[in-house]
Amino acid sequence: MLELVKQRKITDEESAEVEKELTAMREEMIELANAVKMAKLPVIITIDGWSAAGKGSQIKHLIKYMDPRFFDVESIRTPTPEEKRMPWLHRFWKRLPKKGEFLILDGSWYRDTAKALVSGEIDKDTYKQRIGDINVFERQLTDDGCLLIKLFLHITGGEQKKRMDKLAANPYTAWRVDGQDFADNKAYDKFYKRYDKTLERTNTAYAPWHIIPANSRTASRLEILRVVTGSVKAALDAKAKGEPFTETAEFPVNDVRPEKFKLVKTKKLAEIDMDKSLTDKEYGEKLKKYQDRLFELQNICYQRKIPVVIAYEGWDAGGKGGNIKRVAAALDPRGYEVKPIAAPEPSELARHYLWRFWNRLEKDGHFTIFDRTWYGRVMVEVLEKLTPPERTEMAYQEINEFEHMLTEWGAVVVKFWINIDKDEQLRRFTERQNTPSKQWKITDEDWRNREKWDDYEKAVDRMIELTSTEFALWTVIEGNDKKYARIKALKTICRAIEENIK
Protein backbone atom coordinates (compact mmCIF):
# COMPACT_ATOMS: atom_id res chain seq x y z
CA MET A 1 0.00 0.00 0.00
CA LEU A 2 2.75 2.45 0.91
CA GLU A 3 4.37 2.15 -2.50
CA LEU A 4 1.17 3.50 -4.07
CA VAL A 5 1.43 6.75 -2.13
CA LYS A 6 2.99 9.68 -3.96
CA GLN A 7 4.47 12.59 -2.04
CA ARG A 8 3.13 15.99 -3.02
CA LYS A 9 4.54 19.51 -2.77
CA ILE A 10 2.55 22.73 -2.61
CA THR A 11 3.90 25.19 -5.14
CA ASP A 12 4.08 28.93 -4.52
CA GLU A 13 1.24 29.42 -6.98
CA GLU A 14 -0.96 26.97 -5.04
CA SER A 15 -0.15 28.18 -1.53
CA ALA A 16 -2.64 31.07 -1.38
CA GLU A 17 -5.55 28.89 -2.54
CA VAL A 18 -4.50 26.10 -0.20
CA GLU A 19 -4.53 28.45 2.79
CA LYS A 20 -8.03 29.60 1.87
CA GLU A 21 -9.23 26.01 1.66
CA LEU A 22 -7.58 25.15 4.97
CA THR A 23 -9.22 28.11 6.70
CA ALA A 24 -12.62 27.20 5.24
CA MET A 25 -12.35 23.59 6.38
CA ARG A 26 -11.19 24.55 9.87
CA GLU A 27 -14.23 26.80 10.21
CA GLU A 28 -16.39 23.99 8.87
CA MET A 29 -15.04 21.76 11.65
CA ILE A 30 -16.79 24.03 14.18
CA GLU A 31 -20.16 23.27 12.61
CA LEU A 32 -19.35 19.59 12.19
CA ALA A 33 -18.30 19.23 15.83
CA ASN A 34 -21.64 20.74 16.89
CA ALA A 35 -23.49 18.44 14.52
CA VAL A 36 -21.60 15.43 15.91
CA LYS A 37 -22.66 16.43 19.42
CA MET A 38 -26.32 16.85 18.40
CA ALA A 39 -26.36 13.55 16.49
CA LYS A 40 -24.61 11.73 19.37
CA LEU A 41 -22.06 10.32 16.94
CA PRO A 42 -18.86 9.03 18.58
CA VAL A 43 -15.80 9.80 16.47
CA ILE A 44 -12.33 8.30 16.88
CA ILE A 45 -9.48 9.65 14.77
CA THR A 46 -6.24 7.67 14.98
CA ILE A 47 -3.11 9.37 13.71
CA ASP A 48 -0.32 6.87 13.25
CA GLY A 49 2.79 6.95 11.13
CA TRP A 50 6.52 7.39 11.18
CA SER A 51 8.44 9.07 13.98
CA ALA A 52 8.91 12.77 13.12
CA ALA A 53 6.06 12.58 10.59
CA GLY A 54 4.40 15.54 12.30
CA LYS A 55 1.55 13.83 14.17
CA GLY A 56 1.56 16.38 17.00
CA SER A 57 1.51 19.45 14.77
CA GLN A 58 -1.18 17.94 12.56
CA ILE A 59 -3.40 17.30 15.60
CA LYS A 60 -2.83 20.89 16.72
CA HIS A 61 -4.09 22.22 13.38
CA LEU A 62 -6.97 19.73 13.26
CA ILE A 63 -8.43 20.86 16.60
CA LYS A 64 -7.62 24.54 16.14
CA TYR A 65 -11.24 25.71 16.05
CA MET A 66 -12.95 22.81 17.82
CA ASP A 67 -14.67 23.24 21.19
CA PRO A 68 -12.28 21.64 23.72
CA ARG A 69 -15.24 20.46 25.81
CA PHE A 70 -16.16 17.91 23.18
CA PHE A 71 -12.87 16.34 22.21
CA ASP A 72 -10.02 14.58 23.94
CA VAL A 73 -6.47 14.11 22.67
CA GLU A 74 -4.53 11.12 23.96
CA SER A 75 -0.88 10.38 23.29
CA ILE A 76 -0.20 6.65 23.13
CA ARG A 77 3.24 5.54 24.20
CA THR A 78 4.82 2.36 25.56
CA PRO A 79 2.34 0.77 28.00
CA THR A 80 3.09 1.30 31.69
CA PRO A 81 3.83 -1.66 33.98
CA GLU A 82 0.26 -1.39 35.29
CA GLU A 83 -1.18 -1.41 31.74
CA LYS A 84 0.89 -4.48 30.89
CA ARG A 85 -0.97 -6.36 33.62
CA MET A 86 -4.27 -5.90 31.78
CA PRO A 87 -5.49 -7.25 28.42
CA TRP A 88 -3.50 -5.38 25.81
CA LEU A 89 -6.55 -3.58 24.34
CA HIS A 90 -7.78 -2.58 27.80
CA ARG A 91 -6.13 0.84 27.72
CA PHE A 92 -7.90 1.66 24.46
CA TRP A 93 -11.31 0.43 25.59
CA LYS A 94 -10.94 2.67 28.64
CA ARG A 95 -10.42 5.71 26.42
CA LEU A 96 -13.52 5.29 24.24
CA PRO A 97 -15.38 8.58 23.78
CA LYS A 98 -19.00 9.21 24.66
CA LYS A 99 -21.53 9.50 21.89
CA GLY A 100 -21.25 13.02 20.47
CA GLU A 101 -17.56 13.44 21.29
CA PHE A 102 -14.24 13.15 19.46
CA LEU A 103 -11.27 11.09 20.59
CA ILE A 104 -8.07 11.94 18.73
CA LEU A 105 -5.20 9.53 19.26
CA ASP A 106 -1.57 10.42 18.70
CA GLY A 107 -0.60 6.82 17.98
CA SER A 108 -3.04 4.01 18.69
CA TRP A 109 -3.31 0.24 19.07
CA TYR A 110 -1.01 0.00 16.05
CA ARG A 111 1.88 1.20 18.18
CA ASP A 112 1.53 -2.03 20.19
CA THR A 113 1.62 -4.21 17.05
CA ALA A 114 3.79 -3.18 14.11
CA LYS A 115 6.34 -1.09 15.99
CA ALA A 116 6.33 -3.49 18.94
CA LEU A 117 7.22 -6.40 16.65
CA VAL A 118 10.08 -4.64 14.91
CA SER A 119 11.37 -3.32 18.24
CA GLY A 120 11.38 -6.82 19.72
CA GLU A 121 8.71 -6.10 22.35
CA ILE A 122 6.46 -8.90 21.03
CA ASP A 123 7.01 -12.03 18.92
CA LYS A 124 5.41 -12.95 15.59
CA ASP A 125 2.68 -15.09 17.14
CA THR A 126 1.65 -12.24 19.43
CA TYR A 127 1.71 -9.86 16.46
CA LYS A 128 -0.63 -12.12 14.46
CA GLN A 129 -2.96 -12.44 17.43
CA ARG A 130 -3.06 -8.67 17.85
CA ILE A 131 -3.85 -8.10 14.17
CA GLY A 132 -6.88 -10.35 14.65
CA ASP A 133 -7.84 -8.54 17.85
CA ILE A 134 -7.58 -5.18 16.10
CA ASN A 135 -9.90 -6.22 13.29
CA VAL A 136 -12.42 -7.47 15.88
CA PHE A 137 -12.10 -4.31 17.98
CA GLU A 138 -12.58 -1.97 15.03
CA ARG A 139 -15.54 -3.96 13.71
CA GLN A 140 -17.22 -3.90 17.12
CA LEU A 141 -16.77 -0.12 17.36
CA THR A 142 -18.13 0.59 13.88
CA ASP A 143 -21.01 -1.88 14.28
CA ASP A 144 -22.00 0.14 17.33
CA GLY A 145 -22.16 3.34 15.29
CA CYS A 146 -18.71 4.77 15.94
CA LEU A 147 -17.01 6.68 13.12
CA LEU A 148 -13.42 5.44 13.04
CA ILE A 149 -11.03 7.46 10.86
CA LYS A 150 -7.57 5.91 10.54
CA LEU A 151 -4.76 8.11 9.26
CA PHE A 152 -1.18 6.99 8.57
CA LEU A 153 1.34 9.80 8.02
CA HIS A 154 3.90 8.55 5.53
CA ILE A 155 7.31 10.19 5.03
CA THR A 156 10.43 8.96 3.26
CA GLY A 157 13.51 7.82 5.15
CA GLY A 158 15.49 10.84 4.01
CA GLU A 159 12.80 13.26 5.16
CA GLN A 160 12.60 11.50 8.52
CA LYS A 161 16.38 11.82 9.05
CA LYS A 162 16.32 15.49 8.09
CA ARG A 163 13.54 16.25 10.59
CA MET A 164 15.19 14.34 13.42
CA ASP A 165 18.49 16.13 12.82
CA LYS A 166 16.66 19.45 13.01
CA LEU A 167 14.92 18.47 16.26
CA ALA A 168 18.17 17.25 17.82
CA ALA A 169 20.00 20.46 16.90
CA ASN A 170 17.51 22.70 18.71
CA PRO A 171 17.94 22.73 22.51
CA TYR A 172 14.18 23.29 22.93
CA THR A 173 13.21 20.24 20.86
CA ALA A 174 16.16 17.90 21.37
CA TRP A 175 14.20 16.02 24.07
CA ARG A 176 11.78 14.80 21.39
CA VAL A 177 14.33 12.49 19.75
CA ASP A 178 16.84 10.04 21.17
CA GLY A 179 19.31 7.42 20.07
CA GLN A 180 16.55 4.87 19.50
CA ASP A 181 14.84 7.19 17.01
CA PHE A 182 18.02 7.45 14.95
CA ALA A 183 18.52 3.68 15.19
CA ASP A 184 14.96 3.20 13.94
CA ASN A 185 15.70 5.51 11.02
CA LYS A 186 18.62 3.29 10.03
CA ALA A 187 16.16 0.37 10.05
CA TYR A 188 13.69 2.35 7.92
CA ASP A 189 13.35 -0.42 5.30
CA LYS A 190 12.55 -3.00 7.99
CA PHE A 191 9.88 -0.78 9.52
CA TYR A 192 8.54 0.02 6.04
CA LYS A 193 7.86 -3.67 5.29
CA ARG A 194 6.16 -4.28 8.62
CA TYR A 195 4.06 -1.12 8.46
CA ASP A 196 3.01 -2.01 4.93
CA LYS A 197 1.91 -5.54 5.91
CA THR A 198 0.06 -4.20 8.93
CA LEU A 199 -1.79 -1.63 6.86
CA GLU A 200 -2.81 -4.29 4.33
CA ARG A 201 -4.04 -6.73 6.98
CA THR A 202 -6.13 -4.11 8.77
CA ASN A 203 -7.47 -2.24 5.76
CA THR A 204 -11.08 -3.38 6.05
CA ALA A 205 -14.34 -2.20 4.54
CA TYR A 206 -15.53 -1.05 7.98
CA ALA A 207 -12.24 0.63 8.98
CA PRO A 208 -10.18 1.56 5.90
CA TRP A 209 -6.83 3.34 6.05
CA HIS A 210 -6.12 6.83 4.74
CA ILE A 211 -2.43 7.08 3.97
CA ILE A 212 -1.35 10.72 4.08
CA PRO A 213 1.77 11.75 2.10
CA ALA A 214 3.49 13.86 4.78
CA ASN A 215 6.81 15.04 3.33
CA SER A 216 5.04 18.38 2.84
CA ARG A 217 3.41 19.54 6.08
CA THR A 218 0.99 21.84 4.29
CA ALA A 219 -0.06 19.21 1.76
CA SER A 220 -0.64 16.64 4.51
CA ARG A 221 -2.60 19.19 6.58
CA LEU A 222 -4.87 19.78 3.61
CA GLU A 223 -5.38 16.06 2.98
CA ILE A 224 -6.12 15.30 6.63
CA LEU A 225 -8.79 17.99 6.84
CA ARG A 226 -10.32 16.81 3.58
CA VAL A 227 -10.52 13.24 4.85
CA VAL A 228 -11.88 14.18 8.28
CA THR A 229 -14.49 16.69 7.11
CA GLY A 230 -15.59 14.41 4.28
CA SER A 231 -15.93 11.37 6.51
CA VAL A 232 -17.75 13.21 9.30
CA LYS A 233 -20.22 14.82 6.87
CA ALA A 234 -20.94 11.49 5.20
CA ALA A 235 -21.38 9.71 8.53
CA LEU A 236 -23.74 12.42 9.81
CA ASP A 237 -25.77 12.23 6.62
CA ALA A 238 -26.06 8.44 6.88
CA LYS A 239 -27.08 8.67 10.54
CA ALA A 240 -29.76 11.25 9.72
CA LYS A 241 -31.17 8.83 7.13
CA GLY A 242 -30.97 5.91 9.53
CA GLU A 243 -28.52 4.12 7.26
CA PRO A 244 -25.25 2.35 8.13
CA PHE A 245 -22.13 4.24 7.11
CA THR A 246 -19.08 2.74 5.45
CA GLU A 247 -16.15 4.89 4.45
CA THR A 248 -14.93 4.75 0.88
CA ALA A 249 -11.76 2.66 0.79
CA GLU A 250 -8.81 4.07 -1.15
CA PHE A 251 -7.04 0.72 -1.38
CA PRO A 252 -8.21 -2.90 -1.84
CA VAL A 253 -9.78 -4.06 1.41
CA ASN A 254 -9.00 -7.18 3.38
CA ASP A 255 -12.14 -9.32 3.65
CA VAL A 256 -12.08 -10.18 7.36
CA ARG A 257 -14.81 -12.57 8.49
CA PRO A 258 -15.73 -12.98 12.17
CA GLU A 259 -14.13 -16.07 13.66
CA LYS A 260 -16.42 -19.05 14.16
CA PHE A 261 -15.77 -20.40 17.63
CA LYS A 262 -16.36 -24.05 18.42
CA LEU A 263 -19.40 -24.39 20.67
CA VAL A 264 -19.94 -27.05 23.32
CA LYS A 265 -23.26 -28.86 23.22
CA THR A 266 -25.48 -27.87 26.16
CA LYS A 267 -28.76 -28.92 27.74
CA LYS A 268 -31.85 -26.75 27.87
CA LEU A 269 -32.86 -25.55 31.33
CA ALA A 270 -35.97 -27.75 31.28
CA GLU A 271 -33.74 -30.82 30.92
CA ILE A 272 -31.74 -30.11 34.09
CA ASP A 273 -32.31 -32.41 37.08
CA MET A 274 -33.19 -30.00 39.88
CA ASP A 275 -33.35 -32.55 42.70
CA LYS A 276 -29.66 -32.27 43.68
CA SER A 277 -29.05 -31.56 47.36
CA LEU A 278 -26.59 -31.96 50.25
CA THR A 279 -27.04 -32.71 53.93
CA ASP A 280 -25.79 -30.16 56.44
CA LYS A 281 -22.90 -32.46 57.33
CA GLU A 282 -21.89 -32.98 53.69
CA TYR A 283 -22.11 -29.26 53.11
CA GLY A 284 -19.91 -28.38 56.08
CA GLU A 285 -17.20 -30.85 55.08
CA LYS A 286 -17.17 -29.91 51.41
CA LEU A 287 -17.34 -26.18 52.12
CA LYS A 288 -14.12 -26.30 54.14
CA LYS A 289 -12.41 -28.59 51.61
CA TYR A 290 -13.08 -26.42 48.57
CA GLN A 291 -12.63 -23.07 50.28
CA ASP A 292 -9.22 -24.19 51.55
CA ARG A 293 -8.28 -25.40 48.09
CA LEU A 294 -9.47 -22.19 46.45
CA PHE A 295 -7.32 -20.16 48.84
CA GLU A 296 -4.28 -22.22 47.80
CA LEU A 297 -5.12 -21.74 44.13
CA GLN A 298 -5.55 -18.00 44.58
CA ASN A 299 -1.98 -17.79 45.84
CA ILE A 300 -0.73 -19.76 42.83
CA CYS A 301 -2.66 -17.45 40.49
CA TYR A 302 -1.14 -14.41 42.19
CA GLN A 303 2.39 -15.77 41.91
CA ARG A 304 1.94 -16.72 38.25
CA LYS A 305 -0.05 -13.58 37.41
CA ILE A 306 -3.04 -15.61 36.20
CA PRO A 307 -6.26 -13.54 36.13
CA VAL A 308 -9.54 -15.21 37.04
CA VAL A 309 -12.90 -13.88 35.81
CA ILE A 310 -16.04 -15.39 37.34
CA ALA A 311 -19.41 -14.44 35.83
CA TYR A 312 -22.66 -15.03 37.71
CA GLU A 313 -26.07 -15.01 36.06
CA GLY A 314 -29.30 -16.65 37.18
CA TRP A 315 -32.94 -16.31 38.04
CA ASP A 316 -34.10 -13.63 40.45
CA ALA A 317 -33.83 -15.09 43.98
CA GLY A 318 -31.59 -17.82 42.60
CA GLY A 319 -29.02 -17.34 45.35
CA LYS A 320 -26.22 -15.55 43.50
CA GLY A 321 -25.40 -13.34 46.47
CA GLY A 322 -24.99 -16.19 48.93
CA ASN A 323 -23.02 -18.17 46.39
CA ILE A 324 -20.62 -15.30 45.74
CA LYS A 325 -20.27 -14.75 49.48
CA ARG A 326 -18.97 -18.32 49.96
CA VAL A 327 -16.50 -17.94 47.11
CA ALA A 328 -15.26 -14.59 48.39
CA ALA A 329 -14.92 -15.97 51.93
CA ALA A 330 -12.21 -18.32 50.65
CA LEU A 331 -10.13 -15.56 49.09
CA ASP A 332 -7.58 -13.07 50.35
CA PRO A 333 -9.54 -9.78 50.18
CA ARG A 334 -6.53 -8.00 48.69
CA GLY A 335 -6.73 -10.17 45.61
CA TYR A 336 -10.33 -9.97 44.44
CA GLU A 337 -13.17 -7.57 43.68
CA VAL A 338 -16.87 -8.30 43.38
CA LYS A 339 -18.51 -6.17 40.69
CA PRO A 340 -22.31 -5.86 41.11
CA ILE A 341 -23.87 -4.90 37.78
CA ALA A 342 -27.05 -2.83 37.75
CA ALA A 343 -28.75 -0.81 35.01
CA PRO A 344 -26.11 1.20 33.13
CA GLU A 345 -25.36 4.79 34.16
CA PRO A 346 -25.74 7.59 31.57
CA SER A 347 -21.98 7.63 30.90
CA GLU A 348 -22.13 3.87 30.27
CA LEU A 349 -25.14 4.12 27.98
CA ALA A 350 -23.17 6.67 25.95
CA ARG A 351 -20.54 4.06 25.02
CA HIS A 352 -20.30 0.54 23.65
CA TYR A 353 -22.08 -1.83 26.06
CA LEU A 354 -18.87 -3.81 26.69
CA TRP A 355 -17.02 -0.66 27.81
CA ARG A 356 -18.20 -0.87 31.42
CA PHE A 357 -17.07 -4.50 31.70
CA TRP A 358 -13.63 -3.86 30.23
CA ASN A 359 -13.34 -1.04 32.78
CA ARG A 360 -14.16 -3.32 35.71
CA LEU A 361 -11.50 -5.97 35.08
CA GLU A 362 -8.88 -6.47 37.77
CA LYS A 363 -5.20 -6.87 36.84
CA ASP A 364 -3.54 -10.22 36.30
CA GLY A 365 -3.11 -12.39 39.35
CA HIS A 366 -6.42 -11.13 40.74
CA PHE A 367 -10.01 -12.37 40.71
CA THR A 368 -12.87 -10.35 39.17
CA ILE A 369 -16.29 -11.65 40.24
CA PHE A 370 -19.25 -10.24 38.30
CA ASP A 371 -22.70 -10.32 39.92
CA ARG A 372 -24.60 -10.11 36.63
CA THR A 373 -22.72 -9.47 33.45
CA TRP A 374 -22.52 -8.52 29.79
CA TYR A 375 -25.18 -11.19 29.15
CA GLY A 376 -27.86 -8.65 29.99
CA ARG A 377 -27.41 -7.65 26.36
CA VAL A 378 -29.04 -10.89 25.17
CA MET A 379 -31.58 -11.25 27.98
CA VAL A 380 -33.19 -8.15 29.50
CA GLU A 381 -32.29 -5.90 26.55
CA VAL A 382 -33.93 -8.38 24.17
CA LEU A 383 -37.07 -9.01 26.19
CA GLU A 384 -37.58 -5.38 27.17
CA LYS A 385 -36.77 -4.22 23.63
CA LEU A 386 -34.15 -1.78 24.94
CA THR A 387 -31.80 -2.32 21.99
CA PRO A 388 -32.46 -2.74 18.26
CA PRO A 389 -32.73 -6.45 17.34
CA GLU A 390 -29.90 -6.23 14.81
CA ARG A 391 -27.52 -5.11 17.56
CA THR A 392 -28.58 -7.75 20.08
CA GLU A 393 -28.10 -10.43 17.40
CA MET A 394 -24.51 -9.25 16.96
CA ALA A 395 -23.92 -9.58 20.70
CA TYR A 396 -23.48 -13.37 20.73
CA GLN A 397 -20.45 -13.06 18.46
CA GLU A 398 -19.17 -9.97 20.28
CA ILE A 399 -19.42 -11.68 23.66
CA ASN A 400 -17.56 -14.75 22.41
CA GLU A 401 -14.86 -12.45 21.04
CA PHE A 402 -14.65 -10.57 24.35
CA GLU A 403 -14.26 -13.78 26.33
CA HIS A 404 -11.74 -15.10 23.80
CA MET A 405 -9.61 -11.99 24.34
CA LEU A 406 -9.79 -12.59 28.09
CA THR A 407 -8.43 -16.10 27.62
CA GLU A 408 -5.74 -14.80 25.24
CA TRP A 409 -4.70 -12.55 28.12
CA GLY A 410 -4.34 -15.73 30.18
CA ALA A 411 -7.54 -15.48 32.18
CA VAL A 412 -9.47 -18.42 33.57
CA VAL A 413 -13.09 -17.61 32.65
CA VAL A 414 -15.84 -19.34 34.65
CA LYS A 415 -19.52 -18.68 33.88
CA PHE A 416 -22.42 -19.74 36.07
CA TRP A 417 -26.14 -19.81 35.45
CA ILE A 418 -27.81 -20.36 38.86
CA ASN A 419 -30.94 -22.30 38.00
CA ILE A 420 -34.05 -22.71 40.13
CA ASP A 421 -37.49 -23.88 39.14
CA LYS A 422 -40.57 -21.70 39.07
CA ASP A 423 -42.04 -23.11 42.27
CA GLU A 424 -38.84 -22.53 44.23
CA GLN A 425 -38.67 -18.96 42.99
CA LEU A 426 -42.25 -18.33 44.17
CA ARG A 427 -41.42 -19.78 47.58
CA ARG A 428 -38.38 -17.50 47.92
CA PHE A 429 -40.26 -14.43 46.66
CA THR A 430 -43.03 -15.07 49.18
CA GLU A 431 -40.53 -15.55 52.00
CA ARG A 432 -38.84 -12.28 51.15
CA GLN A 433 -42.17 -10.47 50.94
CA ASN A 434 -43.19 -11.75 54.37
CA THR A 435 -39.85 -11.20 56.14
CA PRO A 436 -39.26 -7.53 57.10
CA SER A 437 -35.45 -7.88 57.04
CA LYS A 438 -35.59 -9.32 53.52
CA GLN A 439 -38.26 -7.13 51.92
CA TRP A 440 -35.62 -4.89 50.33
CA LYS A 441 -34.62 -7.87 48.18
CA ILE A 442 -37.99 -8.07 46.42
CA THR A 443 -39.33 -5.45 44.01
CA ASP A 444 -42.28 -4.99 41.71
CA GLU A 445 -39.90 -5.57 38.82
CA ASP A 446 -39.07 -9.04 40.19
CA TRP A 447 -42.75 -9.98 40.11
CA ARG A 448 -43.13 -8.48 36.64
CA ASN A 449 -40.13 -10.45 35.35
CA ARG A 450 -41.61 -13.63 36.79
CA GLU A 451 -44.61 -13.20 34.51
CA LYS A 452 -42.17 -13.47 31.57
CA TRP A 453 -40.59 -16.68 32.86
CA ASP A 454 -41.15 -18.66 29.65
CA ASP A 455 -39.72 -15.90 27.46
CA TYR A 456 -36.69 -15.54 29.72
CA GLU A 457 -36.13 -19.29 29.70
CA LYS A 458 -36.04 -19.33 25.89
CA ALA A 459 -33.60 -16.41 25.89
CA VAL A 460 -31.35 -18.13 28.43
CA ASP A 461 -31.38 -21.41 26.50
CA ARG A 462 -30.34 -19.56 23.35
CA MET A 463 -27.70 -17.55 25.22
CA ILE A 464 -26.10 -20.68 26.68
CA GLU A 465 -26.28 -22.52 23.37
CA LEU A 466 -24.57 -19.74 21.40
CA THR A 467 -21.94 -18.69 23.94
CA SER A 468 -20.80 -21.93 25.56
CA THR A 469 -17.37 -22.11 23.98
CA GLU A 470 -14.46 -24.43 24.74
CA PHE A 471 -12.57 -21.51 26.30
CA ALA A 472 -15.53 -20.05 28.25
CA LEU A 473 -17.90 -22.86 29.07
CA TRP A 474 -21.22 -22.30 30.83
CA THR A 475 -21.88 -24.25 34.02
CA VAL A 476 -25.55 -24.54 34.94
CA ILE A 477 -25.85 -24.91 38.71
CA GLU A 478 -28.83 -26.71 40.16
CA GLY A 479 -29.85 -24.10 42.70
CA ASN A 480 -33.03 -25.34 44.38
CA ASP A 481 -30.77 -26.42 47.24
CA LYS A 482 -28.49 -23.49 48.07
CA LYS A 483 -25.95 -25.70 49.83
CA TYR A 484 -25.51 -27.89 46.76
CA ALA A 485 -25.26 -24.82 44.51
CA ARG A 486 -22.50 -23.24 46.62
CA ILE A 487 -20.38 -26.37 46.68
CA LYS A 488 -20.76 -26.95 42.94
CA ALA A 489 -19.64 -23.38 42.24
CA LEU A 490 -16.56 -23.70 44.47
CA LYS A 491 -15.67 -27.08 43.00
CA THR A 492 -16.07 -25.80 39.42
CA ILE A 493 -13.83 -22.77 40.05
CA CYS A 494 -11.14 -24.95 41.63
CA ARG A 495 -11.17 -27.41 38.73
CA ALA A 496 -11.04 -24.65 36.12
CA ILE A 497 -7.98 -23.10 37.75
CA GLU A 498 -6.30 -26.49 38.25
CA GLU A 499 -6.69 -27.27 34.57
CA ASN A 500 -5.09 -23.94 33.71
CA ILE A 501 -2.04 -24.35 35.95
CA LYS A 502 -1.09 -27.90 34.91
Image (cartoon, helix red, strand yellow):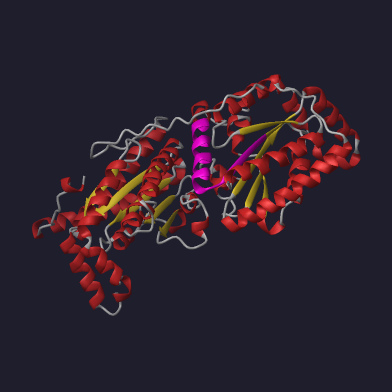
The furthest residue to the bottom: 171
Image quadrant where residue 77 sits: bottom left
Does the stretch in magenta take in 403?
yes
In the picture, measured across the screen, residue 338 lies left or right of residue 285, that is: left
Residue 266 image offset from top left, x and y in percent: 61, 24
Specify whether residue 461 is painted magenta. no
- Along the line of sight, the residue nearer the viewer: 419 or 288: 288
Relative vertical location of residue 244 with respect to residue 341 in this rendering, above or below: above
Percent x, y for residue 400? Answer: 51, 35
Q: In the image as oriented, which residue stretches furthest toward the front? A: 502
Prevailing SS of the magenta stretch: helix
Quarter of the figure that contains the N terminus: top left
Q: Eyeballing the image, is 168 above or below 191? A: below
Instruction: Examine the rendering and report whether any part of residue 354 can be seen.
Output: yes
Residue pictured at 23% horizontal, 53% vertical:
192
Viewer-side residue, 100 vs 17: 100
Residue 402 pos. (x, y %): 51, 40
Residue 170, quarter of picture: bottom left
Which range of residues does the magenta coloring cover?
395-416
Query: 140 or 45, which lies in front?
Result: 140
Across and down, in percent, residue 493 comes to 67, 42
Pick the residue in front: 226 or 13.
226
For image coordinates 21% across by 59% down, the residue present is 188
Residue 436 located left or right of residue 250: right
